[in-house]
Image (cartoon, rainbow, N blue to C red):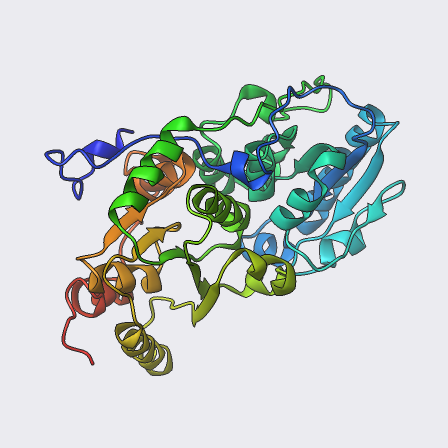
């Protein structure tokens, strides 16, 4: 899909550009060829939230049996590695049901991306059933893989199609389709993106205020660190703030470690589209807080999620400030391409009454009178 052809994009002002995600800066410019280094001997398998699969009608017994086959496959192919299993932050049920013989349980209460960031130099490969952590690992220059195609007979088309759309641009070696496949190293070299650096150097020279990074999902944590380091590499004294629309998974992030990359961290609640009085009132209260929040002339807003109520409010109330949106190809494909299988394969797709109310009445693009 060509993002420049989206309805909301104005093709006359040429304000869409393609660049690499800034992982290079997160690792302080390490730029070496990936190789089979046996000092990097950790193999990590990231677990899933069993509750989600149960709600979607997946047979739990068959799911666990297939996961055990995945673990057997890893035992066979990585005999000389330190095998590790890290459970999903939402629950331990999967780990309690799996056969983890030979695997070390890592239950350190930090999220997957931060774990990968802190242990990158020791990790040989990353696997999951179909977690975004595998996508993040690949972005960080690690060997990374998913097994979800092996679960097609268990999870069905309704769960497989969204995963296909999410991972649509990953290399073939990223997907394990059967347990007889030979694993191919797919780690890539992290390189400095001169275009991205030049872009921000130019924008910083024109806008001298504070930088506000706005995020919702915890999977962007390393990209946020990278953005902080990129900006500081250009202007060491520039103030950088972080605004979080708090998802429950942010509880897995160590604030003592993560917050040191920012001069100020502001946390607002995650707002779900709902017409329930209590949630609607919470949304209105959040709007009032955001409208009173001081964004000065010359400040730059950098959005990392594109689908957050808090983010929409901030961008809508500060149209005179420079606003930059950063979005991965997977998110464009999954959330904005109406030709993907999530839309075309769902005859019952519709907008809820709550979505209509928020978009047409309450969203800040329409609502400017609340004070």
Q: Residue at x 60, y 43 (%)?
A: 133
Check the picture and name the quadrant holding the N terminus.
Answer: top left
Q: Residue at x 17, y 62 (%)?
A: 365
Q: Say which of 275 and 316 sits in front.
A: 316
Q: Say which of 22 and 355 sits in front.
A: 22
* 363 lies above or below 174: below
Q: Is residue 174 left or right of residue 233?
A: right
Q: Quadrant of residue 336?
A: top left
Q: Is residue 148 left or right of residue 94?
A: left
> How many numbered badges does the structure rendering display?
0
* 38 lies above or below 109: above
* 185 lies above or below 138: above
Residue 71 percent coordinates (x, y): 78, 36
Residue 310 percent coordinates (x, y): 34, 64
Q: Is residue 59 left or right of residue 157?
A: right
Q: Is residue 137 visible?
A: yes
Residue 192 percent coordinates (x, y): 49, 28
Check the picture and name the quadrant holding the C terminus.
Answer: bottom left
Q: Say which of 271 and 178 sits in front.
A: 271
Q: Is residue 347 visible?
A: no
Residue 8 percent coordinates (x, y): 17, 44
Q: Quadrant of residue 255?
A: bottom right
Q: Is residue 325 left or right of residue 58?
A: left
Which residue is the extreme one toward the left? 12
Q: Residue at x 55, y 58 (%)?
A: 55
């Amino acid at each position: 899909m060509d993002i420049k052809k989206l309805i909301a994009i104005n093709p006359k002002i040429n304000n869409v550009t393609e660049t690499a995600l800034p992982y290079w800066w997160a690792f302080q410019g390490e730029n070496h060829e990936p190789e089979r280094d046996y000092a990097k001997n950790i193999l990590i398998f990231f677990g899933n939230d069993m509750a989600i699969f149960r709600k979607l009608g997946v047979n739990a017994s068959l799911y666990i049996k297939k996961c055990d086959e995945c673990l057997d496959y890893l035992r066979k192919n990585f005999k000389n590695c330190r095998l590790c299993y890290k459970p999903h932050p939402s629950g331990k049920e999967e780990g309690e049901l799996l056969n983890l013989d030979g695997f070390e349980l890592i239950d350190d209460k930090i999220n997957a991306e931060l774990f990968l960031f802190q242990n990158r130099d020791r990790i040989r490969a990353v696997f999951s059933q179909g977690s975004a952590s595998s996508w993040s690992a690949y972005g960080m220059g690690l060997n990374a893989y998913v097994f979800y195609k092996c679960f097609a007979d268990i999870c069905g088309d309704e769960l497989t199609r969204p995963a296909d759309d999410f991972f649509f641009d990953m290399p073939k070696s990223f997907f394990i389709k059967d347990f007889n496949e030979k694993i191919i190293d797919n780690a890539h070299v992290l390189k400095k993106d001169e275009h991205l650096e030049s872009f921000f150097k130019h924008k910083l020279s024109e806008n001298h205020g504070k930088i506000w990074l706005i995020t919702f999902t915890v999977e962007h944590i390393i990209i946020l660190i990278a953005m902080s380091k990129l900006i500081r590499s250009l202007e060491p004294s520039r103030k950088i703030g972080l605004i979080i629309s708090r998802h429950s998974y942010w509880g897995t992030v160590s604030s003592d470690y993560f917050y040191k990359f920012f001069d100020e961290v502001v946390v607002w609640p995650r707002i779900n589209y709902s017409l329930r009085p209590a949630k609607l009132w919470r949304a209105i209260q959040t709007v009032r807080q955001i409208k009173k929040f001081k964004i000065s002339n010359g400040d730059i807003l950098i959005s990392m999620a594109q689908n957050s109520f808090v983010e929409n409010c901030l961008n809508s109330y500060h149209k005179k400030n420079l606003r930059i949106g950063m979005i991965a190809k997977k998110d464009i494909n999954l959330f904005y391409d109406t030709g993907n299988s999530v839309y075309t394969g769902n005859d019952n797709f519709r907008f809820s009454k709550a979505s209509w109310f928020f978009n047409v009445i309450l969203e800040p693009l329409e609502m400017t009178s609340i004070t």
